[in-house]
Image: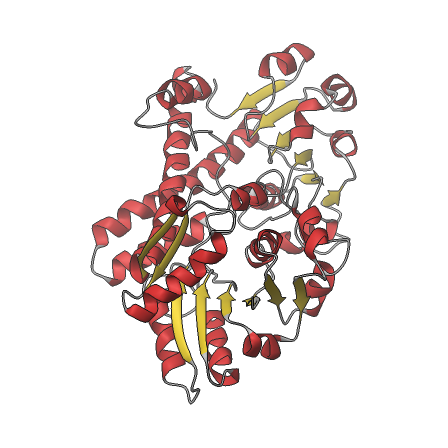
Amino acid sequence: MDKTKICCIGAGYVGGPTMAMIAYKCENAIVQVVDLNEERIAAWNSDELPIFEPGLQEIVESRRGLNLFFSTNVNQNIQEADIIFISVNTPTKTFGVGKGRAADLRFIEACARQIASVCSGGKKIIVEKSTIPVKTAQSIKEILDSSDSSTEFQVLSNPEFLAEGTAIEDLKDPDRVLIGGEQTQDGLIAIEKLASIYAHWIGNDQIIRTNLWSSELSKLTANAFLAQRISSINSISALCEATGADVDEVANAIGKDSRIGSKFLKSSVGFGGSCFQKDILNLVYLCEHFGLPEVANYWHEVIKMNDYQKERFVHRMITSMFNTVSNKQIAILGFAFKKDTNDTRESPAIYICKYLLEEQARIHIYDPKVTRDSIYSVLGIEQNDPRVKVCQNAYDATNGAHAMSIMTEWDEFKELDFEKIYSTMLKPAFAFDGRNVLDSKKLNDIGFRIHSIGKS
């Protein structure tokens, strides 16, 4: 039986784990992950993977060199592949029409043109794995069809629904796999070809087949709905603080309603990551483009509420500390946007740190997975900046601090020796729990002035 040859363009947070899982579950497939970034490919071929996900290292090591390969040889692997995944970055545009809202599709277009230029003959299935706006598949297909290539292309949409920190579990046991394609004979055949890959470990009833546009829009809409729930509970957290209600108790009560459910009702300093804000802004731009300003404004409020939550949190820090943090040492515990990942994209910690630096605070940062270089880079400061110190553990970060602030819900932060921490901090010692993971009563009994989200 001929082995299916798969090539994935892009060795990032989506491409790497997804292809590793396909290789792990489909031993009759040859999976090539290609990227022009030599440093990233070298990391995938080493013991220090470029991204952290629980369980990823073991899966990569079990298949690497057998049917899973990481390479910078892009053209050859494109030529040899039966199925080509496009999994490159689609950031929000920072220039021109749609600046700040629309997706920047230059990398998607570059991939399409590269595929068109190197393929010659036969049939190939092109799979959109990146998060992209509706109708992107049409642009890809137009580029491919207008090339001189004699290859017959079918373009499919197969969006990812991974949550960082649980990506491997999400890939092993997904809620659903969505495959969209043209509703023609060749399009339907292509859909089933891709479905047969996932069918090695996913039941047929979990594989949803749609047209291209429904698949593309479903990804944006799913992220928008999830972010909307977070912003909704965060808006209520402000009311809880004003009235004496407890946001966790409110969330538990409404989450018991089967029509609502309990997921994504955890109040915090705000959502981050590479998807939620980017996808909502893209949805806003699409609504504006199609003449739906009321719909655009509705979804933009989700972003505004997220920004408000971060502003409200840092304002509470300053006002609680006698209206000034100038020259005060503040320990920032956690820098990744969520636990079990080293991803800092759109992390609330970045906003909080920058705001505190503007207020002339001194910041000591600790995160168990985010590197020192990455922290300085995303803050846009030099590594010898005396205002910022990256620490090896939480105890170093809090030693001599006026306040500590939990920015990421790492499990280890719940197990810290807070009596030891309190003894080394300046008094009064402030604790700001941006993730509601600490035992407020315990910290209060120790002597901390504790402030949590949505609690008076």
Query: Looking at the image, which is closer to me, 347 or 116?
Result: 116
- Where residue 72 appears, as percent x and y from the top left, is 66, 72
Give the number of callouts. Answer: 0
Compared across the picture, whether 116 is left or right of 404 comes to left
Q: Is residue 127 visible?
A: yes
Query: Looking at the image, which is closer to me, 204 or 132?
Result: 204
Q: Residue most toward the top?
A: 445
Q: Quadrant of residue 367?
A: top right
Name the quadrant of the N terminus: bottom right
Residue 114 versus residue 253 in the image, above or below: below
| Structure colour scheme | secondary structure
Query: Looking at the image, which is closer to me, 337 or 383?
Result: 337
Query: Looking at the image, which is closer to me, 432 or 34?
Result: 34
- Where residue 282 appears, as percent x and y from the top left, is 37, 57
Residue 90 versus residue 269 in the image, above or below: below
Residue at image point 48% right, 40% down: 271
Q: Can residue 337 be seen in this view?
A: no
- Where residue 63 appears, as percent x and y from the top left, is 68, 55
Q: In which quarter of the image is residue 31?
A: bottom right
- Where residue 73 appears, as percent x and y from the top left, is 65, 75
